[in-house]
Image (cartoon, rainbow, N blue to C red):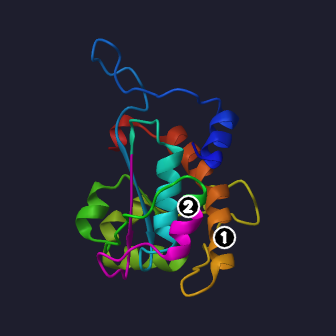
Amino acid sequence: MSTFCSAFDKMWGRDTLISPVNSDGIESNPLSILKKVLFVCTGNTCRSPMAEALFRDLVRERADYQVSSAGVAAAPGMPASKYSVALLKERGINLGSFQSRMLDRQTLEQATHVFAMSSHHMAAIADEFPAHSDKVYLVSEFVAEDALRGRDISDPFGQGRAAYEVTLRDLEKILPSLLAYIDQTWKKNDA
């Protein structure tokens, strides 16, 4: 179990799986409609795979979430960067089999929430897929920490481990606020 998610679980008092149906097979959980969260960066090898893996770990006991990532300029089938893989492995999260993918219309249509790593990614999505811009947010838009709110997540691509550590720490601070935002604002008719 990851310490990142364990701390979040304790903070929010979450210690059990939230099931979408009761023992009679009837929907009983107001959070039960599937939320499909998509993280977007440039190449889908550094920031968005880290965000995807961390957020997936955050909701690992939640049956109402699906998490993925893509890049606005990704070369499909590339592995996650070595530092992304190594840092997440240290947190007990496996990113070794990850493969990058290009953002496309179908992926955006399926997503209920899209979180871009930068304002440039948001603009690229709005230019290419304007019909979906209403569900695109900057990943740092809802974080409580003033120093991070509304800020682009720095791209560690081509840099050393220290740059990846900064990106990872920022994501670890930001992602719990995204989960809280989605849970607090989600309505069944949004799907």
Quarter residue 126 falls in: bottom left
Stretch of the chain drawn in magenta: 66-87
Q: Nearer the viewer, residue 2 or 136?
A: 2
Mark 1 falls on what kind of element? Answer: helix
Query: Is 122 drawn above or below residue 178 in the view shown?
Result: below
The residue depicted at 23 percent of the width and 63 percent of the height is 106
Quarter residue 190 falls in: top left
Residue 167 place in picture, x, y as percent = 63, 70
Mark 2 falls on what kind of element? Answer: helix
Query: Mark 1 is on which residue type?
Result: Glu
| Quarter containing the C terminus | top left
The residue depicted at 48 percent of the width and 57 percent of the height is 53
The residue depicted at 65 percent of the width and 29 percent of the height is 13
Judge from the rendering whether residue 40 lies leftward or rightward of residue 12; answer left or right: left
Residue topped by disc 2: 88
Residue 8 place in picture, x, y as percent = 65, 42
Quarter residue 111 falls in: bottom left
Question: Is residue 58 a member of the stretch shown in magenta?
Answer: no
Q: Residue furthest bottom?
A: 158
Q: Residue furthest left?
A: 106
Please report whichever mark, 2 or 1, sits nearer to the chain's N-terminal start.
Answer: 2
Residue topped by disc 1: 165
Residue 144 place in picture, x, y as percent = 71, 53
Q: Residue furthest top?
A: 24
| Quarter containing the N terminus | top right
Question: Is residue 68 a member of the stretch shown in magenta?
Answer: yes
Please tell me the numbered disc located at residue 109. none
Residue 60 place in picture, x, y as percent = 47, 41
Query: Mark 2 is on which residue type?
Result: Leu
Q: How many marks?
A: 2
